[in-house]
Amino acid sequence: MGEPAFDEMGSSEGCRPQYVSIRDWIAGTTGQIFEVKRREAEFIFRRKGITFAVYSEGGDPERLIPFDIIPRVIDGAEWSFLARGLEQRVRALNAFIGDVYGERAFVRAGKIPVDLVYQNPSFVAAMNGVEVPAGAYTHVVGVDVVRVGPTEFYVLEDNCRTPSGVSYMLENREVMMRLFPELFTRHRVRPVSHYPEELLATLRSVAPRNCDADPTVALLTPGSYNSAYYEHSFLADEMGIEIVEGADLFVDNLAVFMRTTRGPRRVDILYRRIDDAFLDPLVFRPDSLLGVPGLMAAYRAGNVTVANAVGAGIADDKAIYTFVPEMIRFFLGEEPILHNVPTWQCGIAGERAYVLDHLDELVVKDVHGSGGYGMLVGPHASALERSEFAAKIKATPDRYIAQPTLSLSTCPTFVEQGIAPRHVDLRPFVLFGRNVQLVPGGLTRVALRKGSLVVNSSQGGGTKDTWVIDL
């Protein structure tokens, strides 16, 4: 894992087949044209209001996520392998969540420490015994995957709570088709535009047990000040459903209704983009103004489906991540197709000692962190930063895990210096209802700074269009 980064386009020995046409296109296009196209893309994103909020920044936090106009290319065979591994992983994660709130067989079998699950901040006791339609808890899952070699893929983390980013996947494709239509004529690029249709079908497939008619779906948002509000409104519009806030909903006789100009209308399925703690002030945070009083009672009564399920975030925990391969063996009776990254648990004395002795080699993460926050990239940190982080680990060791510094693959990227390799990851989106669906590709995130391994948009990363092509 300490070897030079794998270049997805190819090395000096030769270009990989899926990138031959892209290589020729790059060679035949001037930097001036690329810059004009980059500015056009930025103008389109700005005109559409595709922004991302970073609340830690002062002043107006709204900004564009940088978009790179050189597509990332994955061939059909590579995608087929990834898709099989992703479906397997999501089936196991979904089974684990159901088991946590049901039979607890995984814990009783000694496959995972009981306190890691039931003392976890993401465990929701109110979900114990709740029956969910089709046994589906993880209706939309974003799995972060990195590549380190021609056939070597690793899962960095699982996002089973409220994964975001799919709107950028869709908008990136639309912008690329507008800016470079001739490039698409040279490739058989698999489409992604049907994702909203597949998402709506997935949601409708898990209508609550007491829904007798055509189910009504609505998207529950915290509101326009949320960092992902553009995505919320985009997806609601694309699916042709209402976007609602907590104040637009009420519960009557254990059923959920939304207020409309024609009077109350029953809501059967809520695609929620609000964290568990804010969903129902009668059960969770009493000071929440974002949720719906009585929602959990309606949920338990089988009168509304909440997607993703309340409590699904238990599978996002970076400490629980280490047990996913065993989940696959336990619940599916299969060997994992996709690898986990080797992980040290700082809460275990022997592993903590190793981490503290090798901080200059490791990436250390807060098990409840997200967006690139609360982490240390040891090889790129100063001695002072490593010393300060070591003190954090010693103070609260259970909060941290550590992993080797993976040499993430690179893709050609248009930067100020011209075309240069930059590190990337991939977030495919898996839809899980009565069936499992994946749109080909996903959201490629790119670390725009030379040598950087941090691809998160909140940390200055950008995005690329992801092509799955048939050679």
Image (cartoon, grey):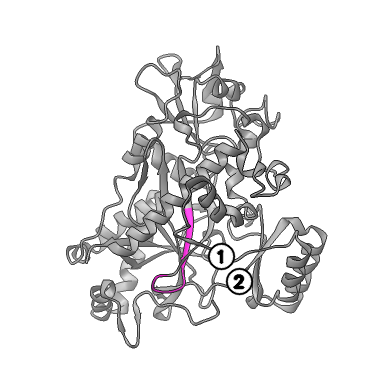
Considering every residue shown, the one lying at the far top of the view is: 253
Residue at 41% in and 79% down: 420
Residues at discs 2 and 1 in contact (Cβ within 8 Å): yes
Residue at 45% in and 17% down: 210
Asked where in the image residue 453 lies, by quadrant, the reply is bottom right
Residue at 31% in and 70% down: 36
Which part of the image, by quadrant, shows the C terminus?
A: bottom left
Under circle 2, the secondary element is strand
On whether residue 441 falls in the magenta region, the answer is: no
Choose the circle earlier in sequence order: 2 or 1.
Answer: 1
Q: What is the three-letter code of the residue carrying label 1?
A: Val
- The residue segment tinted magenta is 143-151
Asked where in the image residue 311 lies, by quadrant, the reply is top right
Which part of the image, by quadrant, shows the N terminus?
A: bottom right
Which one is in front, 162 or 39?
A: 162
Residue 24 position in % (x across, y down): 23, 78
Residue 249 position in % (x across, y down): 52, 23
Tag of residue 341: 1
Alpha carbon separation for disc pair 2 and 1: 8 Å
- Local packing at callout 2 (Cα closer than 10 Å; few below 14, some 14-19, many 20+) is many
Residue at 31% in and 62% down: 467
Tag of residue 186: none
Residue 262 position in % (x across, y down): 40, 15
Which one is in front, 368 or 69?
A: 368
- Local packing at callout 1 (Cα closer than 10 Å; few below 14, some 14-19, many 20+) is some
Residue that numbered label 2 is attached to: 404
Under circle 1, the secondary element is loop
- Visible residue check, residue 453: yes
- Seen in the picture, residue 196 relative to 408 is either above or below; the reply is above
